[in-house]
Image (cartoon, rainbow, N blue to C red):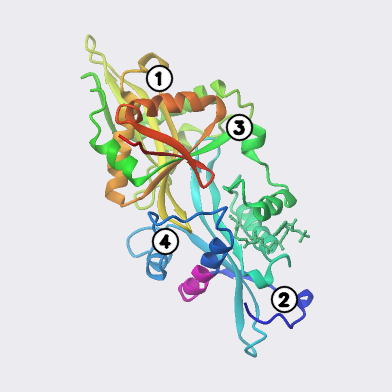
Amino acid sequence: MRGTNFDMEKLDISIRTASRDDVARILEIFEKAAASQADAIPLDSNRSKLTVNVMDRDGFDTRDRAAYFQAVVAETKDVHSKGRKLIVGAATYHFKYSTWVGQVVHLGSVAVDQVYQRKGVATKILKYLGKMAVENKFLRISFEVSDKNEAAIQLFDKIRAKNLTKEEGWLNFSFTPETVDKIIHSASEPVPDDIVVRRTEPKDCQSILAFIRDLATFEKMPDGPKLSVADLQRDGFYKLFPLYLSHVAERTDPDTGEKEIIGYSIYFPTYSPHYGKRIHLEDVYVDPRYRSRGVASSIFQALAKVIFILHVLYITHTSYLKLIFQTIFHIHNLVLQGKWILRVHAGVLELERGGN
Ligand SMILES: CC(C)(COP(=O)(O)OP(=O)(O)OC[C@H]1O[C@@H](n2cnc3c(N)ncnc32)[C@H](O)[C@@H]1OP(=O)(O)O)[C@@H](O)C(=O)NCCC(=O)NCCS
């Protein structure tokens, strides 16, 4: 630990967008923070730990794709080196797509060098991100925190963040790499011939929005979706950087030949400062008339193939408590047949291979 013989109260902290030159220091701060929070953020040997090169590529190499994450740093004068500035805290964030409100900001992580903690650095970083979100008309900033991470919980409580697990019963799910592989290779129940799963086209958005509204009614969420069909048709179909990706399950009536959309998924890449690229599954939904026919499994399989192509390690999913049983039921076909188990790990529920 560095010497602390300087007046902490007079810290002059400024926040700015990070550049590639900051990556090594950001990673150093995150790694030390993870080590100090070993109980709250366990990094077992199976998990990819970020390197400077990977983080540099994922956040700053934007030659042929959007950055997977953005970052800000908090810096102050380095008392050990006249005139130079020292980065003492950092946060990464990325954009998520909510089927309720459109694009939102997701905080990947915020961490502060131990020597500079409890001096308002994290609060200043979060205020900066809040201002940025308001200026860009993002309606929400979201983040996840382990229930063992007292410091972070206190911090978010103090800035009056809403605890969605406590107040509304949302839970986090995560598929491990092995699960994704298993989904791809699973001999799931054959989907009836009249149903195909394909990439979503703009013309499908009307049906998707109707399902999103059904979900809102089912979840008894008074503050339902604010998106329009036009929003969905715009946001998912930017040529270079669509804000979300999606599959639909389409059924062709064997008698009339008429086609109808009977299910959908919406997902997008996100970024974890501990594990790297992830896919967040925002919604998966099957029309109640066609449930228990393997449709959700086929949607998962299509998603798993995308994940395989993108070399993503984890799929995460947040589900409202009342939907949990439904979600588990959908996963049931994929999991129990192959003797897989659900377990809690690092504060999230994960799917993992069972003993036999
Ligand atoms: C959580 C963390 C970012 C807080 O950074 P910080 O700059 O020390 O936070 P602030 O000084 O802005 O603290 C604001 C408030 O948060 C709460 N808080 C912060 N650290 C706390 C701790 N260790 N214990 C209890 N409350 C704490 C307090 O209410 C504090 O206000 P107070 O100092 O007036 O009592 C820092 O402890 C850290 O880097 N932890 C490791 C990484 C991590 O867990 N990140 C969060 C996961 S997303």
In what quadrant does ligand 1 lie?
A: bottom right
Are the residues at dot 1 and dot 3 in contact (C-beta closer than 8 Å)?
Answer: no
Q: Which residue is mark 1?
A: 287
Q: Which residue is mark 4?
A: 49
- Asked if residue 187 is positioned above or below residue 260 in the image, the reply reads below
- Dot 4: what SS? loop
Q: Which residue is mark 2?
A: 12
Pointer 4 or 3: first along the chain: 4
Whether disc 1's CB lies below 8 Å from ligand 1 is answered no
Instruction: Give the camera-side residue of 120 and 227.
Output: 120
Amino acid type at circle 4 is Lys
Amino acid type at circle 1 is Asp
**Is residue 153 visible to the viewer in this orientation of the structure?**
yes
Identify the main secondary structure in magenta: helix
Q: Residue at x 67, y 55 (%)?
A: 151
Whether disc 3's CB lies below 8 Å from ligand 1 is answered no
